[in-house]
Image: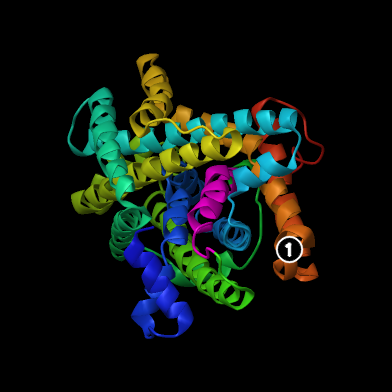
Amino acid sequence: MSHRTSAGMRDVLAGTRRGPRSYLLFFGPAVIASIAYMDPGNYATNIQAGAGYGYELLWVVLMANLIAMLFQALSAKLGIVTGHNLAEMCRDNFSPPLVLAMWVVSEIAAMATDLAEFLGGAIGLALLFHMPLMSGMAVTAVVTYGILMFEGRGFRPMELIIGALVAVIGLCYLIELFIAPVAWGEAANLMLTPQLRDAGALLIAVGIIGATVMPHAIYLHSGLTQNRAPHAGIADQRRILRFSNIEVVLALAVAGMVNLAMVVMAAGAFHAGHSDVAEIETAYHLLTPLLGGAAASVFLVSLIASGVSSSVVGTMAGQMIMQGFIRMRIPIWLRRLVTMLPAFVVVAMGVNATTALVASQVILSIALPVPMIALVIFTRRADIMGEFANSRGIDLLAIGGAAIVLSLNFVLLAATFGVPIPGLAAL
């Protein structure tokens, strides 16, 4: 953070600076983390959910978002209370072989995340400006690197840039909801009525959760908050935590509403006559004859904003993971090059972009237990968190949320690799 921002925060905590605007000084980390919940991987799963099952899977989006709120709040709390991020805590509390294994898995997850995000932005640019996908990827690389250069000026400029891109995504989907035909009553009812019609619905539901709760966002959030309360006392930490929890709820609520809007738009546009839509490119080409060119263009603008911003955030998270686990920091241009190379290799090999997006979600499912379980372990320990250790109720919610996500991810992995699951075929 800049000296000005740090000084402003100290003034607020000391009571010499008041007013609603002063509280905005504490906002930013959750906004950056929230972009992970609106990345191109979400576009793919949400389009499949809405097109194939109408509004029936809205409740899954809502549940996944509530679980994400809990884990992002816990990640922020870890950073605020301990002054260390999750990767650093793993390094300091686990054995070296385990730390090395966790770092390798987390790095693979960061690269898989960036593959999805980078491809999403490139697909949007390629379709909007009628350019080859490789050219779209080159433009995406330049734009994301340019935004990453602002990181040298502190986190506040990055928070403002990412916040603006989040606003663009939200505005785009607000416009889409006015264009697409929506049965609001049915959508509201099914959002609160859990149901899974068949095995296909279950697998899409698992995909939604896998694309929502992201490993790199859990790591990143603790790093963004670890310098928010340097040398703060218990009372100040409590106030900062209160600000953080409010921000998490607001930022993740916006991300949740965007995801709900994606499903609602896909349901309204495609479910009645095009329920087999499963790819981003197909969705775009169908939107023009169904809802008009404006709807298709707005869709692509939101996809580009999503891909660029989430790719920036993914690179930041990868840097933080490496620095936390093995105390190594590499130049940002090298980090950007390493994480985007897999995307160029995938496209050069002729792999379908949407297929690559789905594959990246499978890799994320394998990596997800690492940060989730570690976060639950650390935030429940009184010797680490002091009086801020999870209460029994929060502890049970965190364990239950982790169990739900990890169980469903197991279903996704089993289905992907052809492992028979008792009861799944009966749905």
Residue 56 sits in quarter: bottom right
x and y percentages locating residue 407 in the rendered image: 74, 45
Q: Residues within 10 Å of mark 1 (few under 14, many from 20)?
A: some
Camera-side residue of 179 and 400: 400
Front residue of this view, candidates 328 and 321 = 328
For the C terminus, which image quadrant?
Answer: top right
Residue at the top extreme, as displayed: 349
Give the colouring mode of the picture: rainbow
Q: Is residue 358 visible?
A: no
Tell me if residue 195 comes above or below residue 296 in the rendering. Answer: below
- Location of the N terminus by quadrant is bottom left
Amino acid, disc 1: Leu
Q: Position of residue 182 (x, y in %)?
A: 39, 64
The residue that label 1 is drawn on is 397
Lateral position of residue 254 relative to residue 154, left or right: right
In magenta segment, residue 215: yes
In this picture, residue 424 sits left or right of residue 59: right
Percent of width and height locating residue 68: 58, 57
Most common SS among magenta residues: helix
Can see residue 382?
A: yes
**Magenta segment range?**
205-230
Residue 365 figure quarter? top right
Viewer-proximal residue among 93 and 144: 93
Label 1: element kind: helix
Q: Is residue 258 magenta?
A: no
In the image, residue 380 lies at what x, y percent? 76, 60
- Tell me which residue sits at (36%, 66%) in the image: 5
Q: Residue at x 41, y 52 (%)?
A: 266
Find residue 191 and report its image quarter: bottom right
Q: Residue furthest front?
A: 231
